[in-house]
């Protein structure tokens, strides 16, 4: 049975960034359920916008985005809709429109060959025994098992690693539903939609490469019914849907308290959304995935006596920032405070009527 310095479960932005940073410094194995290339198999449902914090992470690493990752058009404002109050406002934003699946595959392609990567692979079981982590997985049709000194959970909202480390921990979850339509709007736009009758979270839309993507985060029990009801309500705001060409769904975390940020224990670590590192005000997680990988990398290679304590301390500023997003989300999802903010017109940029 092979032994590694680090085993990474999941190669989204967090896991892929960490694997790249550990290359050449540690013996690393990484497991990912996405295939190595193509659109078959698992794809992450996501609006696909790269926030300024994520852009800064690539600047620090000296990495530029390839053309085939960037989507069109580039939109520099968010159309914010309060359905109940019948209000629409436009606010400036500096996101980069990307193809999320192409972005994830590109991030994996940056991992050097000295990292052992298994694609299209399912992690079956993890456990700790004799001060090392055991990882059982199925790859290439064969059941395999390895051991590792460090275990890193970069496996997103339904993290197996988080459930193992914190079996009694609960965190607020939503079902994220998303559909793709042929673009029919005369002017492409990006939107953020609030309707407290439908969800106490929020919904979104984005124009991308000739498609119009509409999605949102809804209660787990009856998410599809709420999703369909909101689509019907948005016709009054000039949203045009037509027949869906593709439907997607996944679980998304919604941190709502300080205790929702969990870092790991016993030489196991959580990064990205698996740690609860996702913005409660926008559900944006790529920035914090990259930041947490950047924080953990030198800790693992430095091999301190208490690596978990060092990681917890090093992520404190990140967790405080994310707690600020929780406070912001409470203001945005409150019908009263949101209506007051939007009616004030602060930072609103008027746009032509043809945008609705």
Image (cartoon, rainbow, N blue to C red):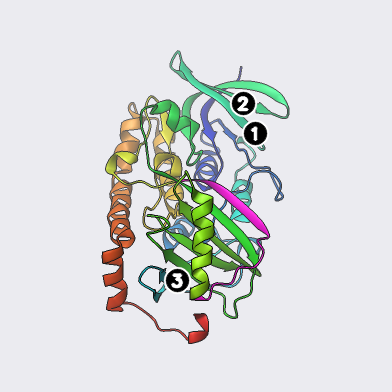
* Farthest top residue in view: 130
Q: CA distance from mark 2 to mark 3?
A: 42 Å
Residue at 55% across / 62% down in the picture?
A: 214
Q: Earlier in the sequence, mark 2 or mark 3?
A: 3
Tell me where the magenta segment starts and ends, as one range.
237-252
Q: Is residue 241 magenta?
A: yes
Q: CA distance from mark 3 to mark 1?
A: 37 Å
Mark 1 and mark 2 in contact (Cβ < 8 Å)? yes
Q: Quadrant of the N terminus?
A: top right
Q: CA distance from mark 2 to mark 1?
A: 7 Å
Residue 78, disc:
3
Q: Which of the two marks, 2 or 3, is nearer to us in this view?
A: 3
Which residue, given by chain and number where applicable, does mark 1 sit on?
A: 121
SS under mark 1: loop
Residue at 54% across / 72% down in the picture?
A: 239
Mark 1 and mark 3 in contact (Cβ < 8 Å)? no
Q: Which of the two marks, 3 or 1, is nearer to us in this view?
A: 3
Height in image: 350 above or below 5? Answer: below
């Amino acid at each position: 049975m092979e032994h590694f310095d680090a085993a990474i479960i999941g190669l989204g932005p967090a896991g892929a960034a960490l694997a790249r940073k550990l290359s050449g410094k540690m013996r690393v194995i990484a497991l990912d359920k996405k295939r190595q290339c193509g659109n078959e198999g698992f794809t992450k449902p996501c609006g696909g916008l790269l926030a300024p914090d994520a852009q800064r992470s690539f600047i620090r690493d000296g990495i530029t985005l390839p053309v085939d990752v960037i989507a069109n058009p580039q939109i520099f404002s968010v159309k914010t809709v309060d359905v109940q109050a019948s209000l629409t406002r436009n606010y400036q934003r500096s996101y980069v429109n990307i193809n999320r699946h192409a972005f994830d595959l590109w991030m994996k392609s940056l991992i050097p060959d000295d990292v052992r990567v298994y694609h299209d692979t399912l992690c079956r079981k993890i456990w700790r025994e004799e001060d090392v982590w055991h990882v059982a997985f199925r790859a290439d049709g064969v059941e395999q098992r390895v051991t590792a000194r460090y275990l890193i959970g970069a496996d997103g909202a339904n993290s197996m690693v988080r459930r193992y480390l914190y079996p009694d921990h609960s965190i607020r979850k939503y079902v994220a539903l998303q559909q793709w339509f042929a673009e029919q709007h005369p002017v492409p736009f990006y939107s953020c939609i609030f309707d407290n009758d439908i969800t106490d979270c929020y919904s979104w839309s984005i124009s991308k490469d000739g498609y119009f993507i509409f999605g949102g985060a809804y209660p787990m029990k009856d998410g599809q019914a709420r999703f369909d009801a909101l689509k019907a309500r948005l016709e009054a705001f000039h949203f045009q849907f037509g027949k869906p060409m593709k439907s997607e769904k996944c679980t998304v975390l919604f941190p709502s308290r300080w205790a929702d940020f969990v870092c790991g224990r016993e030489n196991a670590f959580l990064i990205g959304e698996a740690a609860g590192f996702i913005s409660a005000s926008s559900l944006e997680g790529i920035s914090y995935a990259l930041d947490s990988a950047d924080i953990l990398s030198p800790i693992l290679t430095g091999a301190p006596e208490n690596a978990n304590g060092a990681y917890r301390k090093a992520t404190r500023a990140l967790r405080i920032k994310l707690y600020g997003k929780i406070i912001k989300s409470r203001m945005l999802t409150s019908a009263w405070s949101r209506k007051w903010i939007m009616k004030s017109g602060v930072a609103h940029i008027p746009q032509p009527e043809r945008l609705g």
